[in-house]
Amino acid sequence: MIHKLTRDEARRIAVGAQLLDADRPGDVVEVAEQLGAIKIDPTATIAPAEHSILWSRIGLGYDTVQLLKNVERDRLLFEFDGSFRPMSLLPLMMPAMRRWPQRASSREWLQANDRFRTEVLARLRAEGPMLAADIPDTAETARDTSDGWYGASQVVHMLDSLLRQGEIAVVGRKGRHRWWDLAERVYPQNLPEFELDEAEWMLAERRLQAAGIAKQKSPWTPIGEAGEAAVIEGSSRKYRVDPRALDSLLEDPGGRVAFLNPYDGMLFDRPRLKEIFEFDYVLEQFKPKSQRKYGFFAHSILMGDRFVGMLDAEVNRERDLLTVNAVHELLPFDAEEDEMVRAEIVALAEWLGVSVSAR
């Protein structure tokens, strides 16, 4: 069966799958279970990505301590590859983690630094949790650092490698720095076991669950044959839709205004944004100031199932002030829509515990 969807229906499915409709989720774990990953990024023009992503779903009921509690105390979420993920995904990720790395250069580096690897694990076992800065760099072979993302120390490379192999885990954070410990002390014991093929299939289903609808061949949302085939009016591309997401077309909880952090998962698949939402999104963070149209870290404004504008705002914690530099209207607001956006700005300031100032 091939589902034939209008663009309106495709948008509603995507918005509902991302928990951005009027039916707000109740807590952090519910959001993580549905989205699969909550991006971590420290850029705090308004708030760090992990917190603003949760606020845009939960609303004023979200307190940042809830995330820390679920990660560091209750262990219902875990950090992996720059995102917080629900613990239910860990058993599905483990088969691939045990086979990491696939790249020859990474295998060669680990083999050349086997003694270094053993020393890091021994130190964590004896003294963990630890920061990377507390672990001596005794690597015998250095990896290329010309990409600029890492310094000369090989400790971070080794820690990331051990994380990807499931040997160690992030137990918490001290500011932007991660605390590391042995995985056996962080992850639950007696997790379900899956074969690689089964786990990959289930992960594809979870990715589609988070997207609602995605192109069958998408580097942003690898879903393979998960879900059911779908076509969207005016598009020749092959899509897959989560059959459970089709229920949103019958229930229709309605829409609302949401401000999306530039690292929100809703914005990752740029081709899908352009085709379904007619939204040509560009992150201007790394553009020269003279080339920016909407602002350094402008947040997209979603209204119902359409992207209608960009919010350029920043928080001044010394003055307890949220300064709105501009609200760029991609689609002209009527009086009611203008009031809805203003109300959401007031709600954002209330959540941040600051006042609002407009330039």
Image (spheres, rainbow, N blue to C red):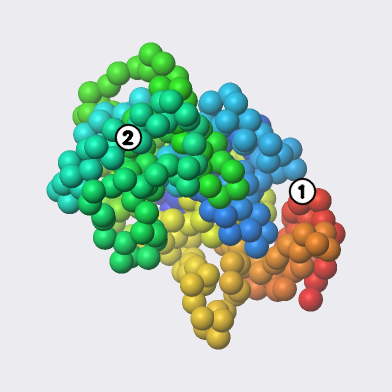
Mark number, residue 351: 1
Residue 166, quarter of the rendered image: top left
What's the amino acid at mark 1? Answer: Trp
Q: Amino acid at mark 2?
A: Glu
> x, y percentage for residue 167?
34, 30
Residue underneath mark 2: 119
Q: Which corner quadrant holds the N terminus?
A: top left
Compared with 160, 169 (above or below) is above
Residue at point 40% right, 32% down? 123
- Vertical relation: 352 (above or below) 88: below
Q: Residue at x 44, y 60 (%)?
A: 273
**Crowd band around label 2 with a 10 angstrom C-alpha radius: few (<14), some (14–19), many (20+):** some
Residue at image location 30% in from the left, 53% down from the top: 219
Residue in the image at 75% along x and 43% along y? 60
Q: How many residues crowd mark 1 within 10 Å: few (<14), some (14–19), many (20+)?
A: some
Q: Residue 27 vs residue 321: left or right?
A: left
